[in-house]
Amino acid sequence: MDHDKIVQKLRAFNNNRDWDQYHNIKDLATAIGIEASELQELFLWKKEDELNVLLEAKRDKIEEEVADIFLFLTMFCYKANIDLENVSLKKMEKNNLKYPVEKIKGKNSKYTEL
Ligand SMILES: [Mg+2]
């Protein structure tokens, strides 16, 4: 499903419930953070060698939290009149300049340390 169709479905879901009135950009930004924390909580205190087992054991819950983050982000963007796909592509171009392959390949340094 492409992003525009997801936006349409999400807007219809909210409009049918008259929930748009509750979705201001401050609360949507907060909701993104809360959902990201819910995702983080699933991995909290787990050791590196437990992560793949955990991923399979809790895959359904992890997928739900990922979807929650995406849906609130999508709602934030349509409320703030942000083209999520466009700004993401622009940011990737910026990152491409910040992290030139010839300087960063195989390293995890910050761009200021290249
Ligand atoms: Mg959630």
Image (cartoon, grey):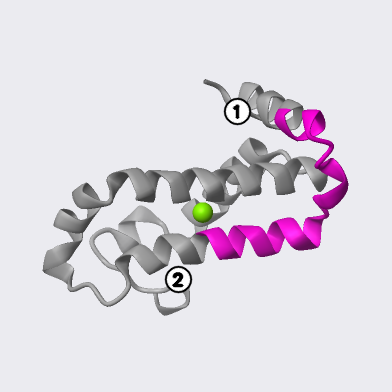
Q: Secondary structure at mark 1?
A: helix
The residue at which mark 2 appears reads as 111
Q: Could you say where residue 62 lies in the image, as x and y percent from the top left?
A: 36, 50
Q: Quadrant of residue 64?
A: top left
Q: Is residue 4 above or below residue 30?
A: above
The question of residue 15 being in magenta is answered with yes
| Observer able to see residue 27 | yes
Q: Which residues are magenta?
A: 13-35
Secondary structure type for disc 2: helix
Image quadrant occupied by the C terminus: bottom left
Q: Residue at left 72%, top 56%?
A: 28
Judge: label 2 CB < 8 Å from ligand 1. Answer: no
Residue 56 at x, y percent in the picture: 20, 47
Q: Position of residue 96 (x, y in %)?
A: 47, 52
Q: Please, what is the dominant secondary structure of the magenta stretch?
A: helix
Q: Residues within 10 Å of mark 2 (few under 14, many from 20)?
A: few
Q: Is residue 96 left or right of residue 33?
A: left
Queried whether the magenta region covers residue 3, the answer comes back as no
How far across and down, in percent of the image, does residue 98 sit? 50, 61
Residue drawn where x is 20% and y is 61% of the image = 51
Amino acid marked by disc 1:
His
Query: What label does residue 3 carry, if any?
Result: 1
| Residue toward you, 59 or 51 | 59
Q: Is residue 100 left or right of residue 88?
A: left
Q: Nearer the viewer, residue 33 or 58?
A: 58
Residue in the image at 60% along x and 42% along y: 71
Amino acid carrying label 2: it is Tyr
| Mark 1–mark 2 distance (CA, rounded to whole Å) | 31 Å
